[in-house]
Structure formats: C-alpha cells, structure tokens
Amino acid sequence: MIAVLGEGGFVVERSLSIAVAQPRCTDHDVAANAVAHAEAVLAADARVVVFPEMSLTGYRLDAVPVFPDDERLAPIVAACAGTGTLALVGAPVPGPHIGVLAVDADGARVVYGKVHLHGSEADRFVPGEPAVIDVDGWRLGLAVCRDTGVPDHAAKTAALGIDGYLAGVVHADHEAELHAERARRVAADHGVWVATAAFAGPTGGGFDRTSGGSGIWSADGALIAGAGAAPDEIARAVFTR
C-alpha cells in the first residue's frame, strides 16, 4: 500500500484496484469492439482495466491505426467517465505501433508501443520503447505479448521504477499456461504485481481459438484472480504493498 498523510496528519493506506478483461471481438469492427470494451469497464468496478493485444481491432496486422481522437472510442470514454476508470486498450496506433491507448474521462492517448515485434509484425510496425504510467501514485510498466517473453524487457521496464507490470496478450488455446509462466517469472525477478489480459474466443492472424485465462499475480508470484476461457470474462484484484 502507499502511505500518505491525510487530514490531521494521519497515515492513509492507498491501494489500487486492477481488472483484466477479455471482451468478445469482431475483426476490424472498432465501433462494435468499443461497445464491448465499455461494457467490460462498467462491469469491472476497477480503477484500471487492462485489455488484450489489439483488442479494438482483433489481431489483424492490416488493421488501420486507431487515432486517439477517433469518435468510435466515445463509448469507452463515457464508461470511464462514469466509473473513474483508466482503460488500457490494445490497438494499432500511429507510428505505426502495436500499441496501448490509455482511455479515461478526458479521452484517449497513446502510452505504449510494443517493443519486441514478432515475425511479420515487423513488416508493418515499428518497435516502441519501455514505458511506465503513473496512476494514483502507482508506477505501472506496460507490455504487449512477446514483450513478456523477453526478460530484458521486464528488466528495462523495472529499471524505470515500477510497482506493477501490465500486459495485453494473444495466445492460442494450447498456450494457455504461457502467460502465467511469464507472469510468475516477472514477479520473481522484480518483486512486482503482474496483470495479464489475454484474448478469449476467435480473432485474426490465424487465432481461431485463443487461450483466455487472463490473470493477476501478486509480487510473490501467487495467482490472486483469474478468468476462464470464455469471452467477456473479467478478473479483478487489489494491488497492495
């Protein structure tokens, strides 16, 4: 928990509620997917909601980049305004990057581009840099899919000073344990909370069946909350120190 001085000089402990969401996805349909994201934000009851890799478009490498001022993001902005949520949404973004849009009551902004591109991703996208965002005094490192499998990525992100490591991924159904293994490694190596949002149901790029299994792990590597394999499931936990 974060200790801050409240009224009268009393120490107040502050925690951070995190959810990982795996909404249903329609390939290339940003408007429909934004509605599904908004529904997830409303259901999650969390300060931060993490979504899978390219969750707004599906894992389609030919998808048109989504700009922060895209009017189709309005349902997510409205949901965040009503709940006080920061949504970390996966999308192709200007750069072009396989990126993360941070959406809140004030709109959207690009906060991250995937660093470690995989295979044909490098034909269409450029790599980003390690990045950290601050939410209510918590420093949260960001990652997208393959980033989580490269120990150097977590090390460079941790060197920026982090309390948690948040990732959006897409894995095939037979890779259901992969993001859990990676999350436990990051927690063990750096002593931080880890939250991974994984696709569930079909998406593009040959992923007819995806793993689901989004989860949140404590700094000692214990699974605190997990989702199943079905679309629209959400897992929620509270980061504490």
Image (cartoon, grey):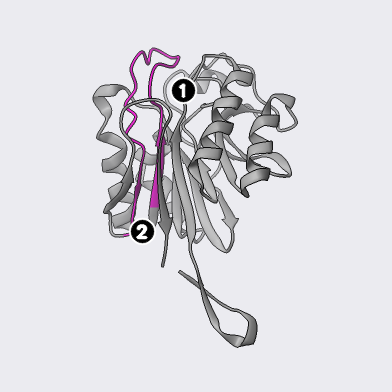
Q: Secondary structure at mark 2?
A: helix
Q: Amino acid under label 1?
A: Arg
Q: Going 59% across and 47% down the picture, which residue do you hit?
A: 85
| Residue 121 against residue 41 in the figure, above or below | above
Residue 151, given in percent of the width and then of the height, sits at: 35, 46
Main secondary structure of the magenta stretch: loop
Q: Is residue 233 left or right of residue 60?
A: left
Q: Separation of disc 1 and disc 2 at Cα? A: 32 Å
Q: At x 52% / y 14%, what residue is drawn?
A: 27
Residue 135 appearing in the image: yes
Q: Nearer the viewer, residue 146 or 40?
A: 40
| Marks 1 and 2, the one that precedes in the sequence | 1
Above or below for 139 versus 61: below
Q: What residue appears at the point 33 percent right and 47 percent down from the top-left corner?
A: 225
Residue visible at 60% across and 87% down in the picture: 9
- For the question of whether residue 113 can be seen, the reply is no
Which residue is tagged 1? 24
Q: Which mark is residue 1?
A: none
Q: Is residue 201 magenta?
A: yes
The picture places residue 77, in percent across and down from the top left corner, at 68, 37
Residue type marked 2 = His
Query: Is 203 situated above or below 109?
Result: above
**Which is more foreground, mark 1 or mark 2?**
1
Label 1 crowding class (10 Å Cα cut-off): few <14, some 14-19, many 20+?
many
Residue 93 location, x and y as percent? Answer: 63, 28
- Counting from the top left corner in percent of width and height, residue 168 is at 45, 36
Of 13 and 147, the residue lying toward us: 13
At numbered mark 1, what does the secondary structure look like: helix, strand or loop?
Answer: loop
Magenta range: 194-219
Q: Quadrant of residue 205?
A: top left
Label 2 belongs to which residue? Answer: 190
